[in-house]
Image (cartoon, helix red, strand yellow):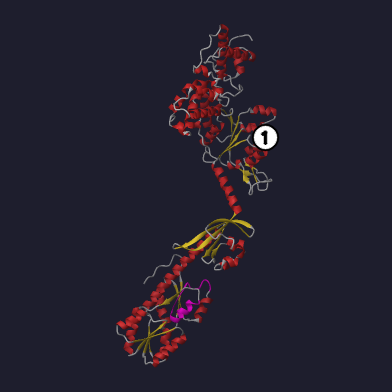
Amino acid sequence: MNRFPAPSGFRPRVWAMGISRLRDLFRDIAREYDGLADLRVVARGFEEAVAEIAAAGPSQRPDVVVAAGANGSYLKARVDVPVVLLQPTGFDVMQALARARREAEHVALVTYGETPAEVRRFASAWGIDVVFASYRSVQDAEACVLDLRDRGVGAVVGPGLVNDLAARLGLVPFFVYSHSSVRSAFDNALEVAQATWRETQRRQRLDSVLQHLRDGVVALDGEGRVEAINQRLAAVLGIDPVLAAGQSLAEIAPDIAFTLPETDGESLETVRGVSYVVHRGPLVDNGVTTGAVLTFQESRAVERLDRTLRTRQRTQQFVARYRLDDLSGATPGIERVRQLAKRYAKSDATVLIRGESGTGKEMVAQGIHRESARRDFPFVAINCGAFPEALLESELFGYEEGAFTGARRGGKVGLIEAAHRGTLFLDEIGEMPLPLQSRLLRVLQEREVVRLGATEPTRVDVRVVAATHRSLAGQIETGEFRADLYYRLNILNLAIPPLRERAADVVPLAAELLLQAARREPRVALRVRTAEAAGTTLAPIAQALAQHDWPGNVRELQNVVERIVVELADTDGEAIPVDVLRTIAPEVFDSAGFAQAVPMEAPKAPMTLRERSLSAEADEIRAALEACSGNRDRVCELLGISKTTLWRRLAAGRAGEMPPAAATSAIPANPATPATGMAPTPSRKRRSRGA
């Protein structure tokens, strides 16, 4: 026997349908299957058996039917339930014929349908004199048994119907089925029931998947008939998905059937006035294409998906790339910036970063974010001076659908919301329009944002870092900046010194920038591989770089380094030819006295005593300016001179000599730039001098 346990949670219902002797044989075996199936013996045949199956409810309907002979063939053609036919084994036939020969001289074997050829060969091989007969219906069976009696047959071997007819006509009946053949039929029935159940579960699972798809899906067989269709597409076509199965798509939806793609691939089609992207793919069974699957995706959904993907890509860009260790420099001013930034990163308080353009304010802001507890969340940066007022408002605060003409369908999340649990960096905060300053103030105070067109606020958890190159205190006096917003922003204050106050950092920083730029230029990368190689390349112009004022700060220095890399790419040596240097950045090399740093011209005539005196005074003033971090009022106080005298003596010193050692960068482009926090130490004692 081949009795496999039923799948977990499944107990197959098996109906054994037979009358007379077969019914009794079914009952003898049924008890053996109590633990494997719900096996019911039904004493019905033909029309009554069909009616019995049809009358059963969904919870009582059999999963498989076991029947024999004409009754089994009759049921198989008329019910939609799997029918397992009971077949006698060769051993059953041999035993039955042997018993029949002991009872009568003439024996007949009556079967439903044609007598199997192997049975005929068996009888011939063993020399058994047997009359073979077959029938197709009850009437055939009656005529067959009557003919056998008239031919002198005394015993008949056959199924139950033939046995009953033979007994009524005075012949000795012998039942062809045995316990072994019934058990084999029951085992086959269990396997069929389990396989059917598994297939049903698989189909239900696939159907569930189809029903949950957002796109319309239909599967067609090779003739264009519907094998499966999900509810979404059925609703579009206005058909019942249950009734559509087995029907031709051309019949149930003739207006679209002939517009669909005939080959595999995608096409844009219009279905019931709506544009769809239709994809056709093959259904393959054992390597043979037996049908096709068509998916219908609304073109507007494709557009929305595209916008969503772009939004996600934008969200992935909300990351901080720089660390505080990336802030190059070893001067006291930049070292203090690093220390304060690391200290501020431990807090959630708002930070205001001050510094000229190009000093690295955003780099510091990113470094603070990466050192903070919010490092795993977004870092969202926006330049407040880069957008018109209306656009800046929608970018910062977001908007609801229909908030204004041209508003995106579904609305848009603002950058403040996008920075939830992370850091919001407001660059050039001094450029923000006054109306938006009041809205930003509420965000900082209440930690909630209201989208344009919305009525309910959204709670946000953001840490705000603002930056400016302007004097916010001066803007408050002129009415360009709100004082209450300034005090809300200026909780933790950080001032980044300009590059001209970090003269010792210029050359190392330039070498680092050169190394980075060289990696992007294959023709230079092989020659400039290390920081030492970069320093060697810059050595001829190091003095000129250190003496320049760098009004554009690090950004200007980076631009000059990029030009140097371009020139290096066209040369074969490790250094740039001297005659090319002056063309790279004349504003740098001319103002820094590059001609004197690299002797290319004949020396000038000796200075007069008057010129030397003026030059010495200019050197003293420059030294004082450098010591006071460019604070002219402090210098005038220390030297006891007026501002007019200060500028006149400096101008006279430049006209008189301008020696290479003169630190021209000591006169800042913006003398009012805040100090870095380092206490200035004047290099000269105060002297009384007349104006």
Is 64 contained in the magenta span? yes
Identify which residue, 328 or 446, lies in the foreground: 328
List x then y, in percent, for residue 159: 41, 83
Q: Amino acid at mark 1?
A: Pro
Crowding near pointer 1: few (<14 within 10 Å), some, many (20+)? Answer: some
Q: Is residue 581 above or below residue 467?
A: above
Q: Quadrant of the N terminus?
A: bottom left
Q: Quadrant of residue 161?
A: bottom left
Residue that label 1 marks: 433
Start and end of the magenta stretch? Answer: 57-78
SS under mark 1: loop
Q: Is residue 160 above or below residue 397?
A: below
List x then y, in percent, for residue 20: 43, 84
Q: Residue at x 46, y 34 (%)?
A: 522
Q: Is residue 228 above or below residue 495?
A: below
The extreme right residue here reads 479
Q: Residue at x 61, y 29 (%)?
A: 469
Q: Quadrant of residue 484?
A: top right
